[in-house]
Image (tube, grey):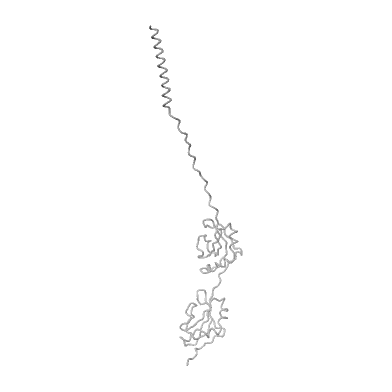
Amino acid sequence: MKSIFKKVMLISLSFFAISTIFTGLTIAQTTKKPLGEIRQLPLPAATTSPTAKPNVSYGACVIRDGYTSLPGYNAADSGKGYAMKKMGTVVDYNDAKSKCIDPIYQQITSSYCATNTNPAQWEVALYDKDGNYKTTGCAQSGCNNHACPVVQYGACVIRDGYTSLPGYNAADSGKGYAMKKMGTVNDYNDIKQKCIDAVYQSLTPPYCQTNTNPAQWEVALYDKDGNFKTTGCAASGCNDHACPVVR
């Protein structure tokens, strides 16, 4: 009986052990964590190399005297000692030079000479994209200095011996004088040729309306501001001319 009991016990223990192992395997399989989903790592953000700003150049035709620094491209079109014509974008210095022809310099001479009197050189200037100076050189026509045209005005004047010469911008007639303004002239001889006797005869009535003294016929040359430069007798002489006697 004891041997039979031992055999039964051994079989029971073996069965229990097998059951325990099987149960453990089952639990392990049911509680095992699933594999995580495969995640794709984000790609690095696309980067582009910074695009270099285009190499933009600007050109200008410049008139400048010898005492003045070259103006920047963004400066005013004219100022003390200079005047300029901005030509916009250009390929290079040679492109700017080909565009700066003599008629352009002649055009901006009036702007320069309106506020400047020094002789000035015609130049070509190349600037970078920010308007800063890069290169400069002489115009196609050369490196000569160019003087401002001398602006002078002329007038034919009737004036008595007690009256100062009126300025060019004075009224056409006043106490002791009458005048005929002849506009711009080349020089004193030019205005003297224009002041013929017929002009003085046309001035006599307005003079004599308010004046009675005999008066001399004169030629007067004025500067660009209307100030007296030179005076002299009319081509017909320096005689005094009396007003006609009204009866």
In the picture, which quadrant includes the N terminus?
A: top left
Q: In the displayed orientation, state which residue is furthest to the bottom.
A: 247
Judge by depth and name the residue closer to the eye, 219 or 83. 83
Quarter of the image where one finds residue 94:
bottom right
Count of numbered marks: 0
- Percent from the top left, x then y, of residue 45? 49, 42
Q: Of residues 243 and 213, which is closer to you in this image?
A: 243
The image shows residue 173 at horizontal and vertical percentages of: 47, 82
Q: Quadrant of residue 11?
A: top left
Q: Is residue 216 above or below residue 70?
A: below
In-image side of 101 versus 21 (left or right): right
**91 or 120, nearer to the observer:** 91
Residue lying furthest right: 141
Compared to residue 201, the image places residue 149 above or below, namely: above
Q: Quadrant of residue 64?
A: bottom right
- In the rendered image, residue 206, in percent from the top left (x then y), is placed at 48, 85
- As drawn, 37 above or below 24: below
Look at the picture and state if 101 lies above or below 21: below
What is the x, y in percent for residue 241? 52, 88
- Whether residue 34 sits left or right of residue 150 in the image: it is left
Most foreground residue, 30 or 53: 30
